């Protein structure tokens, strides 16, 4: 699940009501607990935006293996993002990074080969030019 989808899911649950807080955990430890008061959330747009920005920033640290939970007024906990989700995202990112490194290595190698070929061609042309100049000079 990407950050945008997770934030939208949280917003949807908050709009439905009965949500008391949003909790971000890592390895069971609470990193962030955001109390949610639906009346305040609806009335104070700036504060609401700030809460979503903080949450998005925390979710942006997917590589740290965070989970995000919604705690409803009745105590029910809804997992929005699990540690497994973040591990999958981390693994996917690691695979993409490896693919990019390999592609970059190939491109650098191709550029070096092309450069070396161009240098050799230039040297050959210089040698040919010098030969033409030598042949066109009058001989004693």
Image: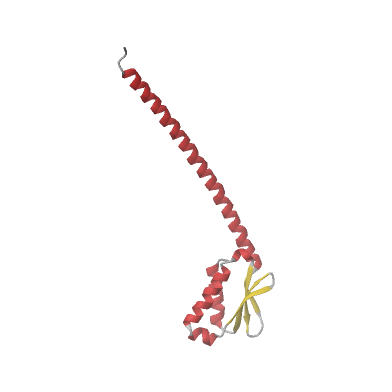
Viewer-side residue, 130 vs 82: 130
Q: Is residue 58 above or below residue 112?
A: below
- On the image, the x and y values in percent for residue 70 come to 61, 78
Return the residue found at the far top: 140
Q: Quadrant of residue 37?
A: bottom right
Return the residue found at the far front: 140
Return the residue found at the far right: 28
Tell whether 77 sits left or right of 56.
right
Tell whether 127 sits left or right of 26.
left
Return the residue found at the far left: 138
Q: Quadrant of residue 38?
A: bottom right
Viewer-side residue, 111 vs 84: 111
Check the picture and name the quadrant holding the N terminus.
Answer: bottom right
- On the image, the x and y values in percent for residue 54 come to 54, 74
Instruction: Tell me which colouring the rendered structure shows.
Output: secondary structure
Q: Is residue 74 above or below residue 101?
A: below
Viewer-side residue, 98 vs 77: 98
Q: Quadrant of residue 30?
A: bottom right
Q: How many marks?
A: 0
Residue located 45% across and 31% down the image = 120
Check the picture and name the quadrant holding the C terminus.
Answer: top left
Q: Is residue 135 above or below residue 81?
A: above
- On the image, the x and y values in percent for residue 4 come to 52, 69
Residue located 63% across and 61% down the image = 88
- On the image, the x and y values in percent for residue 46 come to 47, 80
Residue located 62% across and 58% down the image = 91
Viewer-side residue, 58 vs 37: 58
């Amino acid at each position: 699940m990407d950050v945008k989808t997770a934030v939208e899911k949280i917003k949807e649950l908050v709009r439905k009501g009965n949500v008391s807080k949003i909790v971000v955990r890592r390895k069971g430890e609470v990193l962030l607990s955001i109390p949610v008061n639906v009346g305040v959330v609806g009335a104070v747009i700036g504060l609401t935006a700030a809460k979503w920005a903080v949450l998005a920033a925390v979710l942006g640290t997917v590589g740290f293996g965070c989970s995000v939970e919604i705690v409803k007024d009745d105590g029910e906990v809804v997992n929005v993002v699990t540690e497994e989700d973040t591990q999958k995202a981390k693994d996917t990112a690691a695979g993409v990074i490896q693919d990019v490194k390999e592609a970059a290595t190939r491109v650098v190698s191709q550029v070096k080969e092309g450069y070396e070929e161009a240098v050799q061609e230039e040297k050959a042309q210089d040698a040919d030019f010098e030969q033409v100049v030598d042949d066109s000079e009058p001989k004693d």
